[in-house]
Amino acid sequence: MSPLVAMKKTASSSYLGPGGLDLSKSFFTPISGGSPPSPTKRPTKITVVGVGNVGMAIAQTILTQDLADELALVDAKEDKLRGEMLDLQHAAAFLPRTKIQASVDYAATANSDLCIVTAGARQNPGESRLNLLQRNVALFRHIVPPLAEHSPDCIIMVVSNPVDVLTYVAWRLSGFPANRVIGSGTNLDSSRFRFLIADHLDVNAQDVQAYIVGEHGDSSVALWSSISVGGVPLLSSLERQQIAYEKETLKSIHKEVVQSAYEVIRLKGYTSWAIGYSAASLARTLLRDQRRIHPVSVLAKGLYGIDGGEVFLSLPAQLGRNGVLGVTNLHLTDEEAQQLRTSARTIMEVQSQLGI
Ligand SMILES: NC(=O)c1ccc[n+]([C@@H]2O[C@H](COP(=O)([O-])OP(=O)(O)OC[C@H]3O[C@@H](n4cnc5c(N)ncnc54)[C@H](O)[C@@H]3O)[C@@H](O)[C@H]2O)c1
């Protein structure tokens, strides 16, 4: 058989020569005095569990932004999984080089640096995130323990909803220290918030510092008191200039943030692109040790007067290669602090029904 025929018949293998001969050796001649590859250089590996709309948006953003040397995809549906893997692999000529694997077997995820969990039942139009909970906790019992077993040093990032409670579930099921388990939380809500404020003021959203904290959901809290635009504190500067603003306008902007996901789901059936960019920005900060501050779901016990149990909710947190490095000591107004504690109680009430 000629090598050409063998090449046509062999799928995705580097051993393309007759009898499994490694043809790559025939293309290059080693230089004299070279050393073998350094054992200290380890590839960066990201696993994405769940190759639905959200998982694939995250996967493709990770690829286009060149965030990993290896990408492992896991799902329960074998055909869909293989189809998505091949579709991404076929873009190889247009993307940075990343080794893409896919398997229903968690062995494929071994030695990941970051495991992103998006698997879950999808939020139906009008369905609250909390309704999804029982369905998703059952899935997590099959997902988190094997991830932790195959990558005992990884950081786990939960995206599946309800994200705060499921981050708590992932933390408990993994046995990991709290700094290595985060939920994508209100990183996306805060981006929606910044977009709306930027739109009102006709500025670039990247110049707007604004956080939504608490639950990724209906009880989230907009931190109006700490918003700044290009370093100018928003509300206090309006007050200083005696420019009147309506509290109702502020409330309606926050309401629009909360409704955003429902609106996108109503219109296109699911959300994907914004959460893809949100998760990829978190992956970059974590794996490249960028030490940026993101509002993400972290273990909030004892912070901002939150007591009564172990609860994960979003607070502005500094992230790096060791996961959560710390939570920002923001000054909250009494009203904001109160709303945050109410949000914590909302999540804890749901959590208490889980028996985990
Ligand atoms: N946190 C956020 O900001 C945010 C934003 C958007 C969506 N979400 C959530 O992300 C999740 C996924 O949304 P989607 O639109 O991609 O849903 P989807 O239905 O398109 O995809 C879910 C995937 O999970 C897979 N899956 C189910 N059980 C599995 C198991 N046991 N092991 C492995 N894979 C399994 C399914 O086969 C499917 O491919 C939902 O919970 C959704 O609410 C969160």
Image (cartoon, helix red, strand yellow):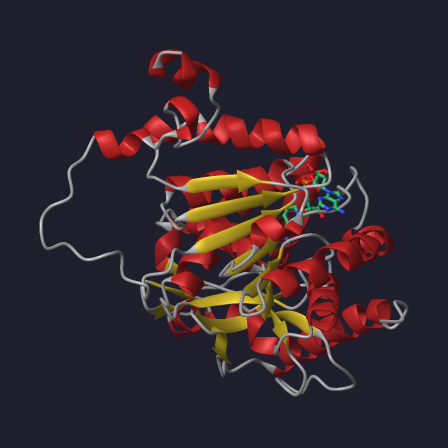
For residue 313, which quarter of the picture?
bottom right
Residue at 79% over, 52% down: 139
Q: Residue at x 37, y 54 (%)?
A: 206
Q: Is residue 278 visible?
A: yes
Q: Is residue 311 above or below residue 64?
A: below
Q: Residue at x 56, y 76 (%)?
A: 179
Name the foreground residue: 35 vs 54: 35
Which quadrant holds residue 207? bottom left
Left or right of 192? Residue 289 is left
Whether residue 185 is visible to the viewer of this picture, yes or no, is: no
Residue 71: % across, % down: 48, 46
Residue 230 is situated, as x and y percent measured from the top left of the image, at 31, 63
The vertical placement of 18 against 102, above or below, is above
Give the percent coordinates (x, y) of residue 274.
52, 44
Q: Is residue 159 above or below residue 326?
A: above
- Residue under the image location 80 percent in, 73 percent down: 348
